[in-house]
Amino acid sequence: MKKFYLTTPIYYVNDEPHIGHTYTTVIADILARYFKSLKYNTFFLTGTDEHGAKVEEVAKKNNFEPKHYCDFISQKFKQAWELLDINYSRFIRTTDPHHEQTVKIALKKLYEKGLIYKSYYEGLYCIHCEKFVSKEELANGKCPDHNLEPILHKEENYFFRLSEYKDIIYKKIESDEILILPLERKNEVLGKLSLGLEDISISRKAVRWAIKIPFDEEQTVYVWVDALINYLSGIDYFKLENSNLCEFWPADLHIIGKDILWFHAVIWPALLLALEVPLPKRILSHGFFTVDGKKMSKTLGNVIKPKQLLELFGVDATRMLLISNFPLGIDGDFSINELKERYNKELADNLGNLVFRTFGMLEKYFKNNFSPKKPSYETKQKLISCIRDYKISFENFNLHKIPHIVLSLTSYANWYIQFKSPWVLFKENKIEELLQVISDILYCIKTSAVLFYPIMPNISKKILKLFKTDNIEENFSFLLENFEIDIEEVKIEKQEILFKKLI
Ligand code: MSP
């Protein structure tokens, strides 16, 4: 059986989930549902990144012990994912004992191989990025991502011989052995790599809320090394638990934001090469977004929480609107008003209205006596071209295009209704012709419902119930392999409104 192992970043627990985290996780869920429906043995890992100075600081501010604080926030992430119908296979926390053990095993291996050594490090450190930053990266002396001055930090640390891996990683990225998507991001990484690669410090003396270095209790593991190893502990790579999950390795896809690409494209592969573990196959790096043209930040008070979107649009529309607002790789902007407009136009007026009016016509013209015809040539061509575009977009991870592709089918069906005017055919008693038109429209509706499944699973199920179809995954794989779908039965009854229009 084919397998697909995909991951999201593990999220910092210094904050509750917002639409940035939601975006990454929804993308992962859509891809997981897609591959699962195509009968891949799919494993989808997400979780929380719980160690580090920043978490300790926030916990203290809130009068919590760090672990209790982590329990509290990681629960918020789990709740948000439940509300968004995120069907992850496992939720990993870096405070899970088996994860901590995995990190220690990995570090011990590196140490025994002589790939870790002790030395002094002095530099500017941004505790919000949890990394040393160079002067060139700063904007007016401040971290450009957090608008805060980094602190000067000097200490004796353990270093990992990252520099030894420069050429090999360059080659693996250049040859797409590690495929970085989109292409511009691959070029960015190659450009930066060609400037050189220095060893990195992988331990801290001052940070106490972290995993202890197994060969030196005075030092703790740098949070990024701790965090990256979650991708191995999440599938029990070193077999600390009694499971066969390790067969999922190597990861088929790491989904991340562009801010953390360097860690995933360079540091992570180097650690894996050093551990003699096979490399992940692909890294999909999405853009960052602003809200109403401004950077999302607590200070500006414009952070959008998933709950806000869920209350307005419901779960399915939230997922669909989030992923289709702009191309995956580029930076984009969100505005609630624009999302409302899109919701009304694309979901209420287009898809929702199509289902409502078609089943209304079925009831009016055919009562309980409807046996569908095969689709006409023109509708069949339209269905085939839509399914083909859909597959290509999924294969290239162009997720933002997918809702628009499926909606082009429902737009076609709405246009077809106007063009063929079934009410005239009914009036003129052209029943055979009427039957063909309604059948054509029903093929479009059923096909779009199946295709929408990874993105809008509940709406998809609701529509497919009208066709007395329960086994969506079966229908999905059949449709994508054969480019056609059958309609055996249709439930003729008055329709509820799928998407209530928003004012
Ligand atoms: N803990 C690290 C990841 C470790 S993975 C081994 C981390 N966490 S995070 O919570 O800060 O962010 C995780 C992801 O959230 C980022 O990769 C990014 O994908 C996403 N986003 C956070 N803010 C965002 C926006 N404003 N826009 C888009 N995505 C954003 O980094």
Image (cartoon, rainbow, N blue to C red):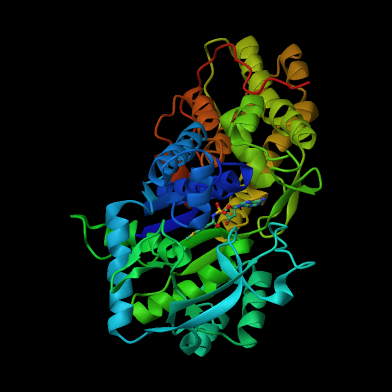
| Viewer-closest of 421 and 103 | 103
In which image quadrant can residue 468 be found? Answer: top left
Q: Residue at x 30, y 85 (%)?
A: 113
Residue 224, compared with residue 296, is above or below; it is below
Q: Residue at x 56, y 44 (%)?
A: 15
In which image quadrant can residue 496 be found? Answer: top right
- In percent of width and height, residue 26 lies at 55, 45
Q: Quadrant of the N terminus?
A: bottom left
Q: Quadrant of ligand 1?
A: bottom right
- In percent of width and height, residue 109 lies at 28, 77
- In percent of width and height, residue 459 lies at 55, 29
| Viewer-closest of 364 and 63 | 63
Q: Quadrant of the C terminus?
A: top right
Q: Is residue 116 visible?
A: yes
Q: Is residue 81 left or right of residue 362?
A: left
In the displayed orientation, state which residue is furthest to the left: 242
| Viewer-closest of 226 and 41 | 226
Residue 29, compared with residue 186, is above or below; it is above
Residue 104, compared with residue 30, is above or below; it is below
Q: Is residue 311 left or right of residue 141?
A: left
| Viewer-closest of 172 and 437 | 172
